[in-house]
Image (spheres, rainbow, N blue to C red):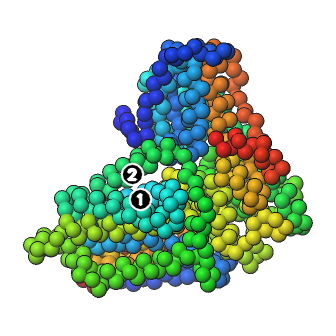
Amino acid sequence: MFALQLKRVLLPGFTTVTALLILWFAVTTQGFFTLDNARAILASMVFVGMVSIGMTLIMVSGAFVSMALATTATISAMIFMASLSFGLPVAIALTVLVGALTGALQGVAIGGWNANPIIVTIAAAAVLEGVAVAFSHGATINPTGTSYTVLNAHLFGLPVGLYALAVLALTAESILRFTRLGPMIYLMGDNRAAARAAGLPIGRIGTAVFAIAGATASLAGIFMASFNHSASLLLNRGTLGYDAIAAVLIGGAAIGGGRGSVLNTMIGVAIIAIVSDLVLLRGFTTGEQILLKGLVMVAFAVGVHLRQEQRA
Amino acid sequence: MIINFKHAYLALALAPVFPASAGAADLSGKHVMLVTCGPSNPWCKTFNERITGLLKETGVKITVLENDLDPIQVNQQMAQAVSQKPDLIMVEPADDKSLIAAVKKAKAAAVPVLYMDSPADEAIMDDIALQVVADNYALGKFAGENIVEGLKAQGRTEANVIAITGSAGTAMVSERQRGFMDAMAQEPAYKVVEVQANNWDPVESGRMAQQLFAKYASLGGIQGVRADADYMAIPILEAARQAGLKLGGKDGLIVSGSTCSPEGIAAIKAGDMIGTATADPWTQGEASAQAAIRFLSGEAVEKTVKVPEFRVTAANVDQYGEVCAK
């Protein structure tokens, strides 16, 4: 009882303090409130944003998270660079197809056979990396021609990738809200047994969710490769997958499934991008940046989830 | 001991079917364990191939343990290597401090260690058999010289410069940074306004650069960037384009890479990048392998073999293009 009261008092305070702290940091950071910086922050959302779209669908469907999406993006980057000799449209289509297929295969195991998603996706990441090493022999894959540079272009001062992210996010949100698949994903995530009893095609829903996640991750890979003008497993060194998971949690999706929205996840992506930018602009060392970024992510994720608990 | 099959494989050298080339030592019966960074890194791929290729010519049996430059994994593999009691362990460190205990254990087990690339910590100088290191100070200095030269050619009387480096905390990275700062100190009007480290991550390098360009846009802008590797410089060049900055030329951004790669060489030829430096994996691997061969043959080898490095600019890019492309 006491704990509940404490939470009731602490929670609004906690959220307000975190928000005020960030605002104060932003106001006192040289160069934060500028158009250039806003553009830089938006640009930095593209890769994490695309991966987190698929991650949202996975979490809503009750399959927790995928540990394979960052690797899928990296492998897709390599496939994209290698297939550019067939022309840009073919390369994009082929890459997205392969990404969707690798996702679908994991979805069959997780949705259809009820395999543990963490184990399946960790295994899938290892297999994908192994295949990539076997085919590339560890070399950097360089593009044929320069057709891909159109993906680095700008429209009204913002990179093409950001528009692609917006279209993808809206499409995914529409799938969740306006198609027959959407409610089925929520129901399956909310109560798998009930969904099965109601005769929902659990296997096919799971496959579809992971196929979409594979496709959006592969699009992230395509933009990543274009930005780096080549692709190798080095692109997998960062925290893409973890940032995407954090974005989904900050966006308020329930880790157990049944609740979440792609547009809210995009707010999570924006918060991570803003915090990453702030700690860099403030001139913290790399170690401090990682620590602060982690703390803010935990603060937001915990705050959001405590609030939902309170509402429920 | 858990063996990670994903990253570890055995490369057993077969006894040479044809006679060894003239001058090559016959070291059949000797066993070398190579603890090195793995195939997910193109630099490491070439480095490992050069080492194993040269060692195999001598008939030595070589076991390769690959890791992802993860200090914990490197330590596990060192323990694994020591337990095999090879004639020599060659190690490419992920973190110099975290390797101290492992090297001391090798010494206690009387297994000689050849430390590669990054200088060994002072605490284990007596415990390693020898080290073959890149001249990291020179690499940093070359980057500074590239940038100063480029800025001067543009006629700039003042400039803001940033450095985006590999993992902070390795002697390799801090030595390079020291060389860089010394070179930049020659021209005090050119200020190094930010030094940011990341984990040799090209994607992160691009993001950091783009956001730092924005930060300094109202403070006179950024005129020069040093990247610790060519593969980190390429996304920085793209970040600059995305930020609407010009590259090279009379008034564009001056970017210097390092540890040259084919993409870097192409960027120099295109005029987008001012220069780079060697420490290419081919030469580095060759020097390490040759030191190992001399050591195993019982020759006296100096404790520290420093591989000479060279500055690469548009003026001599053709000369180094070949070795950088390997």
On whether disc 1 and disc 2 are found on a single subunit, the reply is: yes
Q: Specify whether A185 is left or right of B304.
A: left
Q: Residue at x 82, y 65 (%)?
A: B249
Determine the residue located farthest toward the left in the rendered image: A197
Q: Residue at x 85, y 67 (%)?
A: B250
Q: Residue at x 53, y 37 (%)?
A: B36
Q: CA distance from mark 1 to mark 2?
A: 7 Å
Instruction: Kindly check if marks 1 and 2 are in contact, taking CB atoms under 8 A apart as contact.
Output: yes
Look at label 2 and name its amino acid.
Answer: Leu
Look at label 1 and name its amino acid.
Answer: Thr
Identify the element where label 1 is drawn.
helix
The residue closer to the viewer here, A193 or B169, is: A193
Q: How many residues crowd around disc 1 within 10 Å: few (fewer than 14), some, or many (20 or more)?
A: many
Identify the element where label 2 is drawn.
helix
Q: Specify whether B64 is left or right of B127.
A: left
Relative to residue A221, is residue A274 depicted above or below?
Answer: below
Q: Quadrant of the C terminus of chain A?
A: bottom left
Q: Pointer 2 indicates a residue of which chain?
A: A
List the residue tagged with mark 1. A72
Please provide percent x and percent y for residue A93: 43, 66
List the residue tagged with mark 2. A128
Please provide percent x and percent y for residue A113: 18, 59
The residue closer to the viewer here, A266 or A143, is: A143
Q: Quadrant of the N terminus of chain A?
A: bottom left
Please provide percent x and percent y for residue B61: 49, 21
